[in-house]
Image (cartoon, rainbow, N blue to C red):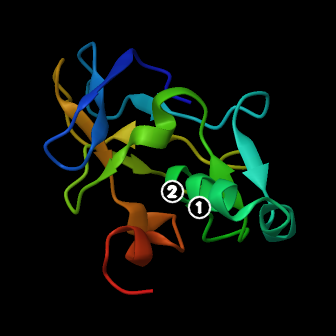
Amino acid sequence: MFVVRTSLRPSAIHGTGVFAEEFIPKGAMVWKFHRELDLVIDKQNLEALEPATQEELQHYSWLDTDLNVWVLSAGHGAFVNHSDDPSMHWMEGGDFYAPSYAVRDIQPGEEITDNYSAYDLDFARKLGRGN
């Protein structure tokens, strides 16, 4: 879940995006996993869901590269768009899922983006880059 003020708006990248509602300095924590709010779904539980529910969940979550489970971020986290030059990045280490930090200053009104390939085994399909 985001730990900075954000809003959802139409995105020039894709559909709806997450936008900063405050100045976020380089190095500041932007997002972190909250055990009480964010969901972790293993493949067996995902496959037990209805096909339409599976598709929606896969669209708004990521397939974790380390644990091979689906992770659904609460709040605006499900609407982060991909960029090959992202404004935030996941950092290794930490408890369970490491937080993401601003890789440069993020201005109010700027879309917050991440590079899906750093943590999502399903990134190529989501970006139309293969299966």
The answer for how far apart the CA atoms under marks 1 and 2 are is 6 Å
Q: Amino acid at mark 1?
A: Glu
**For residue 131, above or below residue 38:** below
The disc label shown at residue 55, or none = 1
Question: For mark 1, does the 10 Å Cα neighbourhood hold few (<14), some (14 to 19), or many (20 or more) residues?
Answer: few
| Identity of the residue drawn at 13% across and 43% down | 12
Q: Residue farthest to the bottom?
A: 130
Task: Identify which residue is drawn at 64% across, 38% down.
Answer: 33
The front one of 113 and 78 is 78
Residue 59: numbered disc: 2
- Numbered mark located on residue 12 in the image: none
The quadrant of the image that shows the N terminus is: top right
Q: Residue at x 54, y 41 (%)?
A: 99
Amino acid type for the residue under numbered disc 2: His
User: What is the x, y in percent for residue 100?
Assistant: 46, 42
| Quarter of the image where one finds residue 41 | bottom right
What secondary structure is marked by label 2?
Answer: helix
Circle 1 — which element?
helix
Q: Using a 10 Å C-alpha cutoff, classify the residue at mark 2 as few (fewer than 14 neighbours), some (14 to 19) or many (20 or more).
A: some
Residue 19, percent across and down?
A: 27, 27
101 left or right, relative to 53: left
65 in relation to 7, above or below: below
Q: What is the tally of numbered marks visible in this picture? A: 2
Q: Are circles 1 and 2 on residues that touch, CB within 8 Å? A: yes
Q: Marks 1 and 2: which is nearer the front?
A: 1
Q: Position of residue 9 (x, y in %)?
A: 26, 26
Question: What is the x, y in percent for residue 88?
Answer: 33, 43
Q: Residue at 39% across / 14% down in the picture? A: 5
- Where the C terminus falls, by quadrant? bottom left
Query: Depth check: 53 or 3 in front?
Result: 53
